[in-house]
């Protein structure tokens, strides 16, 4: 059975794209066929983590939404790009495959979506076609922060939702909104990930507080990490740091959403 997993946060910059890329890579390392779709059409970015350059994107999600190509043509196999140019450290060798469906980074194409919009129903068809035509085990959806049409759609059709938040009062309130929406949409599985936690914080206390606030399991409390900052989205963290505690915590997230 294939699964659709959305990664969302109410506010921006929480770590959605990095978490999505890392979880996709961990799944591929288990031998899974994984699709990663960038539905953050207003401000796409996850292609950077997979080293997919603009001139390699023959077709993007935008082209599909404007009827210029089939959704399958927007999928780029980025498996070979994983794990290249990594000095030192033992590599997690991905046995599976990762396909990236990028959103366009061209100014005119971003502007056109904002100006004209698109048929969200087509996006829904696209998700399901990707799963079928690429024979995916998992489709991961990286989203734009906050609630908009494509986010609501992705939450509604997901088998699992990962909500990322920082231990910050603004995130606390916003996350409550997302949790409420996801409950109304009957998402079968929902987990929270607290990211960028100050290393000096009491992690058990944060976990307890967050679980009590939302009545929802916390799959991981991730520290704010210098290694993650230094990597600066130039690659996938779990490949660079296969033995890091963050990698271990991300594996726990995979186990929880795939269970
Ligand atoms: N645990 C962490 N420690 C330190 N820096 C982190 C951590 N997680 C993510 N970052 C950094 O935070 C920034 C934002 O991460 P990312 O792009 O994954 O967030 P996002 O939620 O997808 O953002 P957006 O809402 O803009 O799409 C990046 O510079 C990333 O390297
Ligand atoms: Mg992002």
Image (spheres, rainbow, N blue to C red):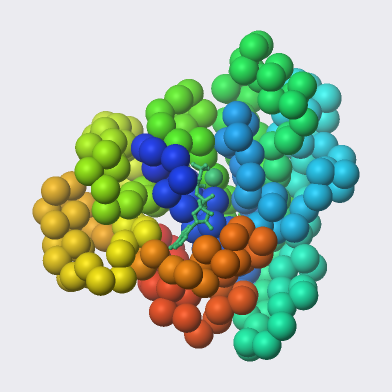
Who's the residue at 30% across and 64% down the image?
198
Q: Quadrant of ligand 2?
A: top right
Front residue (pair 245, 253)? 245
Residue 68 is drawn in which quadrant?
top right
Image coordinates for residue 59, horizontal then vertical, percent: 82, 37
* Total numbered circles: 0
Who's the residue at 52% across and 66% down the image?
228
**Left or right, 118 with reference to 62:** left
What residue occupies the far top of the structure in this picture?
Answer: 116
Who's the residue at 37% across and 58% down the image?
195
Image coordinates for residue 202, horizontal then vertical, percent: 18, 70
- Is residue 186 at least partly visible in the picture? no
Front residue (pair 211, 55)? 55
Who's the residue at 51% across and 36% down the image?
144
Image coordinates for residue 71, horizontal then vertical, percent: 74, 36
Front residue (pair 130, 85)? 85
- Is residue 239 at least partly visible in the picture? yes
Image coordinates for residue 36, horizontal then vertical, percent: 62, 50
Q: Is residue 80 above or below residue 6?
A: below
Residue 87 is drawn in which quadrant?
bottom right
**Left or right, 172 with reference to 233:** left
Q: Quadrant of the C terminus?
A: bottom left
**Left or right, 111 with reference to 174:** right
Front residue (pair 152, 250)? 250
């Amino acid at each position: 059975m294939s699964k659709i997993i959305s990664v969302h946060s109410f506010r921006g910059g929480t770590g959605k794209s990095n978490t999505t890329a890392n979880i996709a890579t961990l799944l591929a390392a288990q031998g899974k066929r994984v699709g990663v779709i960038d539905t953050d059409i207003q401000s796409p970015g996850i292609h950077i983590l997979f080293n997919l350059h603009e001139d390699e994107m023959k077709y993007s999600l935008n082209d599909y939404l404007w009827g210029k190509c089939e959704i399958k043509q927007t999928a780029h196999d980025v498996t070979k790009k994983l794990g290249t140019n990594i000095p030192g450290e033992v590599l997690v060798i991905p046995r599976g495959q990762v396909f990236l469906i990028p959103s366009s980074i061209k100014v005119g194409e971003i502007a056109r979506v904002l100006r004209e919009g698109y048929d969200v129903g087509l996006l829904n068809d696209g998700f399901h076609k990707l799963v079928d035509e690429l024979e995916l085990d998992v489709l991961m959806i990286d989203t734009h922060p906050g609630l908009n049409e494509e986010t609501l759609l992705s939450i509604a059709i997901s088998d699992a939702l990962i909500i990322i938040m920082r231990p910050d009062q603004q995130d606390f309130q916003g996350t409550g909104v997302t949790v409420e929406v996801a409950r109304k949409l009957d998402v079968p599985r929902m987990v929270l990930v607290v990211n960028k936690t100050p290393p000096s914080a009491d992690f058990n206390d944060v976990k307890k507080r967050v679980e009590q606030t939302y009545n929802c399991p916390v799959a991981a409390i991730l520290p704010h990490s210098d290694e993650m900052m230094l990597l600066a989205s130039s690659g996938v963290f779990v490949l660079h740091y296969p033995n890091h505690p963050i990698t271990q915590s991300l594996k726990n997230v995979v186990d929880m959403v795939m269970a």
